[in-house]
Amino acid sequence: MLRQFATFLRNNRGQSIVEFAFILPVFLLLLSGIIDFGRLFYYQDTVSMAAREGARRAIVQGDLAEVTDVVHNFDSEFNVTMKYNPPLASDTAIPPTGTLVTVTVSRQVDLITPIKAFFNDQSFTTVSAKCTMTF
């Protein structure tokens, strides 16, 4: 009887499946974190390029509709704002030379990794970029 119990203790047929069950959630969380980081890096770069192109169009055209079209060529879900410093007297006024034009572009990015949703009930984060050029 003692010999059968010792054989049972040395039998490790289920050991690998138990180890796999412990490691799999950690591996999947790490993998989804890597994917989220890559997506966030991509969207941050794209938002930055869209803000730069929008500011270039703003100093040439000076029209929010044109700036929005240029920015939406990158991604239709981008939010665009444009401000003049000093502010213009009206929407149709032509800015004088030396006026600063600031274009801000932002976008919400849905995350795969559930860690942020665990802490603040949001499964997304917002990336944004701002570009200022002289008119």
Image (cartoon, grey):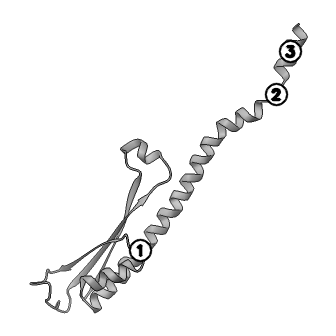
Circle 3 — which element?
Answer: helix
What crowding class fits label 2: few (fewer than 14 Cα within 10 Å), some (14-19), or many (20 or more)?
Answer: few
Amino acid type assigned to the residue bearing label 1 in the image: Asp
From the top left corner, tell me how far across and down residue 62 is, in percent: 24, 88
From the top left corner, tell me how far across and down residue 28 is, in percent: 60, 47
Give the quadrant of the C terminus.
bottom left
Amino acid type assigned to the residue bearing label 3 in the image: Ala
- Residue found 38% across the figure and 49% down from its top: 122
Query: Would you name the residue on which mark 3 appears?
Result: 6
- Residue found 44% across the figure and 73% down from its top: 46
- Residue found 88% across the figure and 7% down from its top: 1
Q: CA distance from mark 2 to mark 1?
A: 54 Å
Q: Is residue 114 above or below residue 48?
A: above
Query: Would you name the residue on which mark 1 appears?
Result: 75
Res 50 → quadrant:
bottom left
Left or right of 25: which side holds 37?
left
State the residue lying farthest toward the front: 76
Q: Earlier in the sequence, mark 2 or mark 1?
A: 2
From the top left corner, tell me how far across and down residue 101 is, in percent: 24, 82
Amino acid type assigned to the residue bearing label 2 in the image: Asn
Query: Would you name the residue on which mark 2 appears?
Result: 12
Left or right of 55: which side holds 14?
right
What crowding class fits label 3: few (fewer than 14 Cα within 10 Å), some (14-19), or many (20 or more)?
Answer: few
* Circle 3 or circle 1, nearest the eye: 1
From the top left corner, tell me how far across and down residue 54 is, in percent: 33, 82
Q: Is residue 40 above or below residue 8?
A: below
